[in-house]
Amino acid sequence: MFTKGLELCERFFHQAAKPIMDKYFGGLAYSAGLLGYGSDVLGYDDEVSADHMWGPRFYLFLSQADVRKKQELMDAFAEHLPYDFEGHSVNFSVPDASYVRRPEVIRAGKVSPLISIHTFDEYLAEYLGTADLDNLTPQDWLYFSEHRLLGLTSGKLFVDGLGIAHILEKLRYYPEDVRLYLIASNWSLIAEEQAFVRRCFDVGDNIGSAIICARMAGRLMRLAFLYCGCYAPYSKWFGTAFSRLPIDAAIGQTISRALSAMDIDQREDGIVLAQKLLADMHNTSGLTKPVKMQIESYYGRDIKVIFAEKIADVVVKKLSGTELEGFRLIGASEGILDKLGGHAPWKSE
């Protein structure tokens, strides 16, 4: 039976690594755990994950005064860690050109474990781009990779002598104005294309219709994460994480039907109903006053919409007086690059 990486790593730390630290570095203040990159941090790992950057591993965080002991610690681990733990190699290959390391079985010599040692500020600066979490601006939040925010706030600290959990609480979720801005942006982007699923098909562009349907589905799914107050992972785990959100099952079912439909009526009905269900979710969220939403004709045409811009407009009003007032509704960094070709002019012109 497959053992989840997070469970394996916690046992590895307590049973194999911590005794070495207790013996040779008694009294050292530190935090240790598994966070950041990796499907094991999110709990999505399986047998396929074990081929690289997976196995007995952890991060060790030291104070600025003690980080000078990094090499001593690595030397002690290399000398005293076992060659394998619960059937998994503790030794890993040297990094390849992409900095990827793979389990590499050895039976003699020193172990090269998958252990990283940093100050927490060093780690944050490298992983997130800044360690100054007390002075983050809305722009900072919108530039951050959402997947990296998820990685930082997932996983587990096995020992926390430095109080890192308290620091990570500052990243637990988006500030409310940023969350509202992202909600308004996604509804606005949906509104821009809401009539195009049918319109593209009607002019003979079924591929374009399907692509737009899929793009709208992704934005609706992202809205579900925002309403649930959960960071979304990157594409590989996006659908998996969405399927585990505490939302009405009909939302996922309707989106799935829209994406798999070969018939344009089924595609349009599915994606429009999914919009209506997310609009209902908005109205029960309490973030704004309820917005009357219904499926209706697009300016008398044979095209079904809910006029999604109505939600975007009411959410934008909540941003009045905040630093995000007047910002173009283009979402976070990934959406900005898609829409503006790599440029990010934050203020509307």
Image (spheres, rainbow, N blue to C red):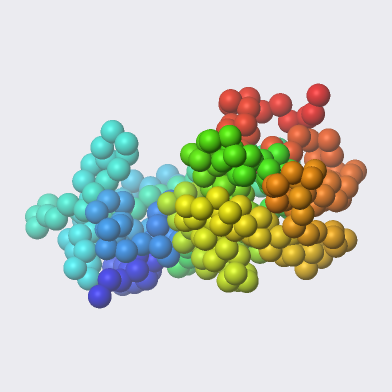
Residue drawn at (59%, 58%), measured in percent from left and top?
A: 270
Residue drawn at (27%, 58%), measured in percent from left and top?
A: 48
343 left or right, relative to 86 = right
Give whichever of 222, 105 is nearer the camera: 222
Q: Quadrant of the C terminus?
A: top right
Looking at the image, is 164 positioned above or below residue 205? below
The x and y percentages for residue 14 are: 36, 71
The x and y percentages for residue 6 are: 39, 66
Q: Residue furthest bottom?
A: 1
276 left or right, relative to 167 = right
4 left or right, relative to 327 = left
The x and y percentages for residue 201 are: 56, 41
Q: Is residue 134 visible?
A: no
Give whichever of 2, 278 is nearer the camera: 278
Q: Quadrant of the N terminus?
A: bottom left
**Location of residue 43 by image quarter:** bottom left
**Location of residue 169 by image quarter:** bottom right
The total number of labels drawn is 0
Looking at the image, is 61 positioned above or below residue 322? below
Looking at the image, is 38 positioned above or below residue 5? above
Q: Residue furthest right?
A: 321
Give whichever of 215, 232 is nearer the camera: 215
Residue drawn at (56%, 57%), measured in percent from left and top?
A: 266
Residue drawn at (47%, 56%), measured in percent from left and top?
A: 260
The x and y percentages for residue 205 are: 53, 36
Q: Is residue 263 visible?
A: yes
